[in-house]
Amino acid sequence: DAKTTQPPSMDCAEGRAANLPCNHSTISGNEYVYWYRQIHSQGPQYIIHGLKNNETNEMASLIITEDRKSSTLILPHATLRDTAVYYCIVRGNNAGNMLTFGGGTRLMVKP
Amino acid sequence: SQTIHQWPATLVQPVGSPLSLECTVEGTSNPNLYWYRQAAGRGLQLLFYSVGIGQISSEVPQNLSASRPQDRQFILSSKKLLLSDSGFYLCAWSVHGDTQYFGPGTRLTVL
């Protein structure tokens, strides 16, 4: 599975949009971009995933560039409870395709 | 809706003692099941995955083993724990190779 690069940390003001970038320049054509987050001492929580089109759900939006080499996760109105480590992962959709979590981005939402 | 349970939530065991961690999934049939370990401050390491009852694939050689005695039950075991087995153990499920959803995790400390 392709590697991803994320900034180690970001701050965001409560109520503002949080835009978390991810680079995945070696992504292959059948690999999806997944986003998870992990709040301390809890299991990772699935947020959203996409292949090449932009996606939106009740938690977030995912913007994938046309060349698929980077993406941005958008939390439209960040709250204090969104403080977590956010992981961007690329993987194929076979049963044996593990989720390889890198360092992620530690998002701190501040009042 | 689907839910995933893990127990115990925390466990402190002496070196050389046996281990049994249990994971169960509700609300879905024939899920793929996964065991991951997350060492302190590090990413996830896939240990085992299963696509059906009695079918186990091991990703990393170690003194751990996994079993799937029932469709929605996945067990992680060890006959003799090592200090290096300490970590946060996460169970996850998916439908075929699709999105993986994680349980709350078991924090294991081996002393």
Image: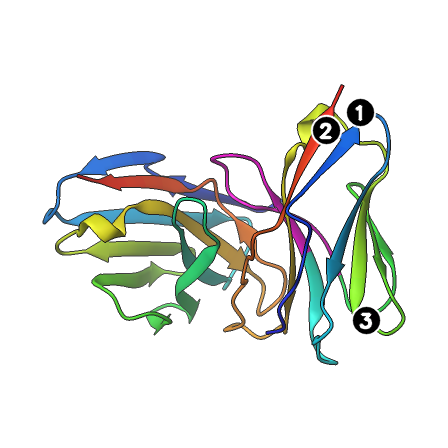
Q: How many marks?
A: 3
Residue reaching furthest to the left:
B16
**Residue at the spot 23% in from the left edge and 55% down from the top edge:** B77
Camera-nearest residue between B32 and B57? B57
Quarter of the image for residue A79 reads: top right
A86 displayed left or right of A22: left
**Residue B4 drawn above or below residue B54:** above
Check whether the beta carbons of the residues at disc 2 and disc 1 lie within 8 A of each other: yes
> Magenta segment, principal secondary structure?
strand
Same chain for mark 3 and mark 1? The answer is yes
Queried whether the magenta region covers residue A42, the answer comes back as yes
A33 displayed left or right of B2: right
Check whether the beta carbons of the residues at disc 3 and disc 1 lie within 8 A of each other: no
The answer to which of marks 2 and 1 sits earlier in the sequence is: 1
The CA distance from mark 3 to mark 2 is 28 Å
Q: Secondary structure at mark 3?
A: loop
Return the mark for residue A68: 3
The answer to which of marks 3 and 1 sits earlier in the sequence is: 1
Residue segment shown in magenta: A35-49
